[in-house]
Amino acid sequence: MRRKATFTVGKAKGVVASLMHRRPFQHMVLRRLRELKKIVPDARDADVDVLLRQTAEYICILELKVAALRRLSAIYGA
């Protein structure tokens, strides 16, 4: 009987070595989700759908900050 590999996202290291050979795409996605959780504020314990929504909101906030800083830079001539 074969064991079914389980996916974990976060600090747990439940990725089986054979899983990386069978499903490299899933492994890559899980690795990138872990990286994203490190970058986005308050996203450590979020589900995937919540994480993606928070990421979109964070990108909008960063774009607004960049626009404001560009305008301030243009006003004060940096």
Image: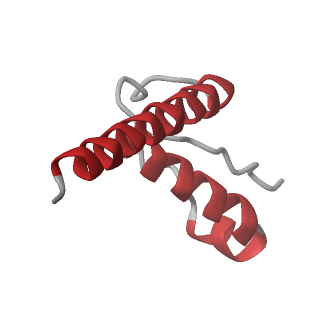
- Relative to 55, say whether 15 is above or below: below
In this view, the residue farthest toward the right is 1
Q: In this view, does 66 lie to the left or right of 22?
A: left
* Image-quadrant location for residue 37: top left
Nearest to the observer: residue 39 or residue 16: 39
> Quick check: 11 left or right of 30?
left
The quarter of the picture where residue 38 lies is top left
Q: Can residue 41 be seen in this view?
A: yes
Percent across and percent down for residue 70 are: 33, 49
Give 58 or 48, whichever is nearer the viewer: 58
Q: Where is residue 7 in the image (x, y as percent from the top left)?
A: 63, 45
Q: Residue furthest bottom?
A: 21
Instruction: Name which residue lies at 34% across and 43% down.
Output: 71
Residue 17 lies left or right of residue 35; in this view the side is right
Q: Is residue 11 in view from this perspective?
A: no
**At 63% across and 27% down in the image, what residue appears?**
53
Establish if 29 lies above or below 7.
below
Q: In this view, does 5 lie above or below 53?
A: below
